[in-house]
Each structure stands twice: as structure tokens, then as C-alpha cells.
Image (cartoon, grey):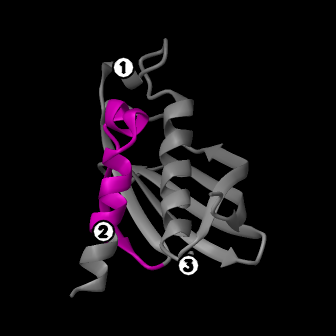
Amino acid sequence: MDERADLVRNLQERLQGSEFHRWAGIELTDAAPGRVEVSFEAGPHHLNLQGLVHGGVIAALADTAMGLAMRTKLGRGRRHVTVDLTVEFMAPGRAGRIVARGRTVKIGRQLGFAEADVVDARGRLLARARSTLSVTSEKG
């Protein structure tokens, strides 16, 4: 069996099982241990009052990429939740394809750290994000 294909399939199933991610149109486009790429097609329901991609949507995309990147490195029986999220917005997002590339920086026994870059279809950096995640055992 191809471990990378299994990883991608597992993460795709996680996203498809989330009503929020389905509504937002967020899809997994690539994954490997410690890194994930997710994307969506920004449409009218993703825009703010100025006609730009809402910062909260960009933050959610980055958070998803970082969380899934962390998921790729956690062993069975462990889970994670974001406890701190910092997003630096670099340029306004417009309707069209938006991509977030998340990567695991470090995982300890109780905390994990991740980063993500969010870019548009032309590769223009829209945002850079960092997160701290609480890492715990699965709850029964």
C-alpha cells in the first residue's frame, strides 16, 4: 500500500466529513508527513463588504492547513486543537483560487507548533500564519 495515498485519502475524508469545510469549499490538494496543502475557490460568499476575501476565511484556511499538517505527524490516539493563532495579512485576496501550505514546525508532548503561507492563484503571498496547538490523548 502507498502510505502517502493513504494519508491523502484519510485527510480528504476528514475534510469531507466537516460541514464547515464543505460549505467553505476547502479541499485537500496535497499532503505528506509534516506538510499539507489545502485550497478553495473564493466566491461571493467568501467576500467582505469591500469585495475582498474575508480575513476570517483566510485565517480559517491557514488554520486548517496547519492543523492537518500537525495531524500528519501525530501518532494514533493523539489529537490537537489550536490554542493560539496569529495571522499577518500581506495583500488583499480576490475571488479565485486561494491556497494554504501548512507545515509542522515541532511537536512536543503537550504542545505543537505550525506555520502556513496563504497565496493566490498567481502565487502572491496573501498571509503568513503561525499557531500553537495543544496536543493531548484522544478522549473516549
In magenta, the rendered stretch is: 8-33
Could you tell me how far apart the alpha carbons at marks 2 and 3 are, in whole angstroms? 16 Å
Q: Earlier in the sequence, mark 2 or mark 3?
A: 2
Q: Residue furthest front?
A: 140
Where residue 22 sits in the image (x, y, percent)?
A: 32, 36
Residue placed at 62% from the left, 57% from the top?
Answer: 140
Task: Using the image, tell me which numbered label, if any, was put on residue 8.
Answer: 2
Q: Nearer the viewer, residue 57 or 67?
A: 67
Label placed on residue 82: none
Foreground residue among 94 and 106: 106
Q: What residue is rendered at 57% in x and 45% in y?
A: 90
* Residue 13 lies in the magenta stretch: yes
Give the x, y percent position of residue 39: 34, 49
* Residue 106 x, y percent position in the rendering: 68, 77
Q: Amino acid at mark 3?
A: Gly
> Taking 22 as reference, is 14 above or below it?
below
Q: State the CA–CA distance, disc 2 to disc 1.
A: 27 Å
Res 97 visible: no
CA separation, marks 1 and 3? 36 Å
Q: Residues within 10 Å of mark 3 (few under 14, many from 20)?
A: few
Q: Give the residue at mark 1.
A: 45
Dot 1 alpha-carbon crowd within 10 angstroms: few under 14, some 14 to 19, many 20 or more: few
Q: Residue at x 36, y 61 (%)?
A: 11
Under mark 1, the amino acid is: His
Helix, strand or loop at disc 3?
A: loop
Return the residue at label 3.
75
Secondary element under disc 2, as helix, strand or loop, is helix
Q: Quadrant of the N terminus?
A: bottom left
Earlier sequence position, callout 1 versus callout 3? 1
